[in-house]
Image: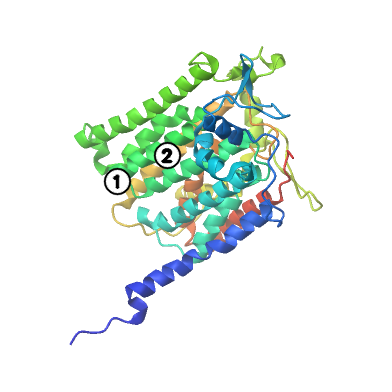
């Protein structure tokens, strides 16, 4: 006699249960759109510099120069024509949507759409964290981490006024998020997709190419467990394939420099005002100022509106991005400063998680050191905007760290508070531009 399968264990029941879990995203979607539009849900108005939409228009007209309106901030001028000087990936993505919707497509609607897609990506990342060998999360914890990844990041603040330079960060954050998603369960095919998404982010924020070699090494390290046994023929072939993608991406942008500015090594310095051209772009003289901006100058809080006050040149990351305190708890527990129960990790997962965290931290620190020498800091915004370039890597560290310490009641309560407060700060932060 064959025992009947209980209804609750049937495949259909499992699919319905899984679908019901995904439906919890809908309130987050509504809240995301509602808060960014002041609950009007109106997306018809463009920001002052919808350059990516204008660039998409130019592509549709088989041109690369744009026709700006009254505002011409952050544009390069050459031979009587105006050019954008950043990567063309966002504009290329928008071409079919601009063709289909025309002027009804606004940069505000694009920013919100990218934000919603990014939310879905991090929802999937949170759900797939156990694939690394970590303990399974409760559904409310998955939604909490999704909330933090969407509302608690500086991207939420930038979406309030999605001018052209802000839009670059939104697209780059999205592509890097996709890259991380494919890195959680790495196969050779997923590794290729991951490096491709990373290169799309680089072609949006060109400075990311600086850490491309580190990301390539990280991808190889977590894709093959025997990576330490170099030379391995399969790993070498995978590395060469990924290296070719990176090199082709670099060549593509150098070619874009040439057709826009007549020089492959001209990255748009023509947009820098005359009064600023006498100063070097990279120098040791900026280190202490940047250290103050990124690590010491705090966000100010008040009990009266506006409740959050930020400086125009950036704020210390710990003073508005409270999630960064969670990895510090893990480090304190590892050092014995805080007593913590060991986390049960699946067999064979310790190696991959350790290398993944080490690689992510190395990439973030390397890029941060680069920023210390950089003259510009992403002014006129709440928070350290240029730190967003590698924020997805730090974000994954934070999510993994939460999974590690969630078995400690006091640590979990503190971590949940940090995640919720980070979202509250971004929601309450007033836009620096209108």
Q: Secondary structure at mark 1?
A: loop
Q: Would you say residue 391 is visible in this rendering?
A: no
User: In the drawing, does residue 367 fall left or right of residue 183?
Assistant: right
Q: Position of residue 91 (x, y in %)?
A: 54, 35
Q: Nearer the viewer, residue 37 or 236?
A: 37
Q: Nearer the viewer, residue 24 or 345?
A: 24
List the residue tagged with mark 1.
187
CB atoms at circles 1 and 2 under 8 Å apart? no
Residue displayed at 20% across by 84% down = 2
Q: Report the residue that reaches farthest toward the top.
A: 278
Q: Using the rendered view, name the quadrant where residue 4 is placed.
A: bottom left
- Position of residue 180 relative to residue 83, above or below, is below
Q: Secondary structure at mark 2?
A: helix
Q: Nearer the viewer, residue 58 or 130?
A: 58
User: In the drawing, does residue 417 fall left or right of residue 349?
Assistant: right
Q: What's the mark number on residue 249? A: none
Q: Position of residue 301 (x, y in %)?
A: 75, 47
Residue displayed at 47% across by 69% down = 20
Q: Using the rendered view, name the quadrant where residue 12 is placed.
A: bottom left
- Position of residue 416 relative to residue 317, above or below, is below
Image quarter in which the N terminus is found: bottom left
Q: What's the mark number on residue 197? A: 2
Decide: few, some or many residues near mark 2? Use Cα within 10 Å; few <14, some 14-19, many ≥20. many
Image quarter in which the C terminus is found: top right
User: In the drawing, does residue 303 fall left or right of residue 424?
Assistant: right
Q: Would you say residue 2 is visible in this rendering?
A: yes
Mark whose residue sits in front, 1 or 2: 2
**Which numbered disc flags the more N-terminal residue, 1 or 2?**
1
User: In the drawing, does residue 301 fall left or right of residue 219?
Assistant: right
Decide: few, some or many residues near mark 1? Use Cα within 10 Å; few <14, some 14-19, many ≥20. some
Q: Position of residue 268 (x, y in %)?
A: 58, 20
Q: Nearer the viewer, residue 74 or 50?
A: 50
């Amino acid at each position: 006699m064959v025992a009947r399968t209980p209804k609750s264990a049937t495949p259909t029941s499992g699919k319905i249960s899984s679908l019901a879990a995904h439906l919890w995203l809908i309130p987050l979607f509504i809240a995301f759109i509602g808060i960014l539009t002041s609950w009007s849900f109106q997306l018809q108005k463009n920001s002052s510099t919808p350059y990516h939409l204008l660039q998409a228009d130019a592509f549709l007209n088989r041109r690369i120069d744009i026709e700006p309106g009254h505002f011409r901030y952050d544009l390069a001028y050459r031979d009587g024509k105006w050019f954008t000087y950043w990567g063309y990936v966002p504009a290329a993505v928008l071409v079919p949507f601009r063709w289909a919707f025309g002027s009804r497509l606004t940069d505000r609607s694009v920013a919100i759409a990218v934000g919603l897609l990014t939310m879905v990506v991090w929802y999937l990342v949170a759900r797939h964290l156990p694939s690394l060998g970590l303990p399974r999360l409760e559904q409310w914890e998955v939604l909490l981490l999704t909330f933090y990844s969407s509302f608690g990041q500086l991207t939420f603040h930038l979406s309030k006024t999605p001018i052209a330079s802000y839009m670059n960060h939104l697209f780059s954050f999205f592509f890097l998020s996709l890259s991380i998603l494919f890195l959680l369960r790495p196969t050779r095919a997923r590794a290729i997709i991951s490096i491709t998404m990373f290169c799309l982010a680089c072609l949006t924020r060109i400075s990311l190419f600086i850490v491309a070699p580190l990301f390539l090494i990280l991808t190889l390290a977590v894709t093959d467990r025997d990576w330490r046994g170099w030379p391995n023929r399969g790993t070498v072939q995978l590395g060469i394939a990924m290296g070719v993608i990176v090199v082709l991406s670099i060549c593509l942008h150098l070619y874009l420099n040439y057709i826009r500015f007549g020089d492959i090594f001209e990255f748009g310095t023509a947009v820098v005002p005359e009064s600023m051209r006498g100063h070097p772009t990279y120098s040791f003289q900026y280190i202490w100022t940047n250290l103050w901006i990124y690590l010491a100058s705090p966000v100010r809080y008040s009990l009266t509106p506006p409740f959050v006050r930020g400086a125009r040149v950036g704020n210390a990351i710990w003073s508005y991005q409270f999630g960064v305190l969670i990895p510090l708890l893990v480090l304190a527990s590892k050092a014995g400063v805080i007593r913590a129960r060991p986390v049960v990790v699946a067999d064979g997962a310790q190696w991959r998680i350790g290398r993944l965290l080490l690689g992510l931290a190395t990439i973030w620190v390397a890029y941060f050191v680069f920023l210390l020498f950089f003259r510009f800091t992403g002014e006129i915004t709440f928070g350290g905007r240029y730190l967003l370039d590698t924020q997805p890597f730090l974000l994954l560290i934070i999510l993994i760290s939460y999974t590690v310490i969630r078995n400690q009641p006091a640590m979990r309560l503190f971590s949940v508070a940090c995640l919720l407060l980070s979202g509250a700060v971004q929601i309450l932060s007033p836009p620096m531009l209108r």
